[in-house]
Amino acid sequence: MIQEKQQTGFPSLDKPWLKYYDKEVINATLPKATLYNYLLNNTIEFQDKIAINYYNKNYTYRDIINQINITASALENLGVRKGEIVTICTINSPETIFLIFALNKIGAIANLIYGVSTESEIKKYIEETNTKFVFTLDIFQNKFQKLLEQEIIEDVIVIESNIVEMSLSITNGFVSWEKFISLNTLSSRTENNEKEVAIITYTGGTTGGSKGVMQSSEGILANVWQYCNMKINLDSNSKWLLVFPLFISFGVFSLLIPLSQGMTIIIRTPMADSIADLCKEFKPNHIMYGPAFWEAFANDNEDLDLSYLIEPMTGGDTLLPSVEEKLNNYLLDHGCYYRIMNGYGMSELGPGISINCKNAYESGSVGVPFVKNIVSAFDVDTGEELTYGKRGELCVCAPSMMVGYINNPDETNKVIIKHKDGKLWVHTGDLGYISENGFIHLVGRIKRYMLCIANGVQKKVFSLDIEKVLNENPYIEKSVVVPMDDTIKNQVPVAYIKLKDFHNNNLVEKDLIKYCEEKLDDIFRPVKYFFVNEFPLTKVGKIDYRALEMKAEMQ
């Protein structure tokens, strides 16, 4: 282990978090394998053990390897080739898992998209990736009807969800999962390049709109391996509850961890059940859930025996210190001797960056960096690294770094930047600091997106997506869109507009409302328009988005 005493005061040089790791882990080599080969090699001794519990059906490790190979063969005979991108628009299901690994086996790429996305968003994802084949659930299949009619895609393979009756007949480009599987010949090639793109998930960057994040097998497994070496009790006899959606990078991450350790995964529809109900039914040892669910769990204060729970984990949103304390007290009072494991991550990093665990815990933080990661805060204006306790933009240098944004080198280069030390760093867009003990603390966001609620579902809405449409309007010289709090929709977009010439603002606003109704889906339409002569700037001449957000709240 390294010495605890810091030599320079700069986290990237001192790496104070390494004191929580064994020397063997610090010096270990990261795995070099594809996702398929990693699963195959890590599960040899668990073949007859139950790998997946999906409602009323169990699959052993032998079963899932067989199903992956059958699916890989069917994909090849469907016409999927090495390097081809195949879109998967589902929720958690065994078929989704088989597809992810089967595509990886034959060297193809899984493009994971959200079924609640609008038809225009889905069309963008399809065209951006040049997708010919789509796999989806029956509840989402109608969103692909026009794409089939326009011959943008060739086939849509439909998986029955057992949630509703089939909404469309399996004809005219729609193919049932059963018919697709019947294409298999029990043989398929195996491609073994861990550095090539394996998965695409969708997220937003520091300054840009929604983008496809390309992740390699090597990068994803670097993340998984590091998590598994955090001195966490990952026993093969444990039960792992998987409720994070598999269309996000964290869902894939939380699938690979238990599978690589020979655990039994309990797979359920994402976020459909309360933690208490799942605990009563399954007594899982490992649970990853969002902060809001953990807060509700503590507030309900049910009289449960939680002595079996060894990894209560959360991330993806702010966990208030008061909630953290209340939750930890509740866990302890009910027999769980592990505190809530608050973590931090982003899709561009595969997604894990840091986590609190039993042997490395600092209240109010999002944990210590994974062993091979380097994390520090940098001055937003000057780019200089900051010392302990000083707040700036959090940047990460990690082996799990994304390959890049698909078809978007400009945005990739805005997020992955070479610093003076010669290393490539991911700029997270989050504000925070590193404590002297090596823990990461978040204090805010500089990412330009908002969290809006539409039809009961929370969705990220990216400012750049709206600005791009507004800036195409002939009246507008430049627009800036920022979030404003809303009691019903959580956050809504408002637009600051600089016009090209003098116009009557009232008339322009009426035209813009009509224009946005034609060009944007409801959730993307600004609820207010503010006309300005100039935009406020930071001291280095950049638009001051935070000043505009504060102004919007006061108007």
Image (cartoon, rainbow, N blue to C red):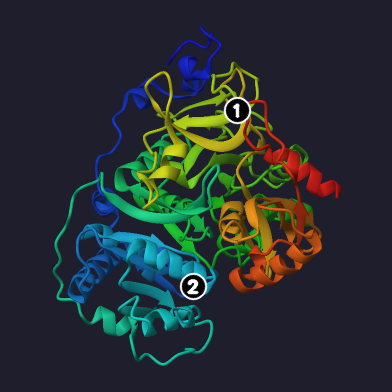
Q: Does the residue at mark 2 contact the one at mark 1 (Cβ under 8 Å)?
A: no
Is 190 left, or right, of 62 in this rendering? left
Is 195 left, or right, of 117 in this rendering? left
Horizontal and vertical percent position of residue 4: 52, 12
Image quadrant where residue 367 sits: top right
Horizontal and vertical percent position of residue 97: 37, 64
SS at mark 2? loop
Which label sits on residue 264?
none
In the rendered image, the vertical position of residue 210 relative to residue 80, given as above or below: above
* Mark 2 vs mark 1, CA separation in Å: 48 Å
**How dense is the environment of label 2, judged by Cα within 10 Å: few (below 14), some, or many (20 and up)?**
few
Which label sits on residue 380?
1
Q: Could you tell me which quadrant the N terminus lies in?
A: top left
- Residue 108 visible? The answer is yes
Residue at horizontal 79%, vertical 48%? Answer: 552
Amino acid under disc 1 = Val
Is 32 left, or right, of 528 in this rendering? left
- Residue 234 visible? The answer is no
Horizontal and vertical percent position of residue 419: 43, 24
Residue at horizontal 22%, vertical 74%? Answer: 74
Q: Name the residue under label 2.
A: 55
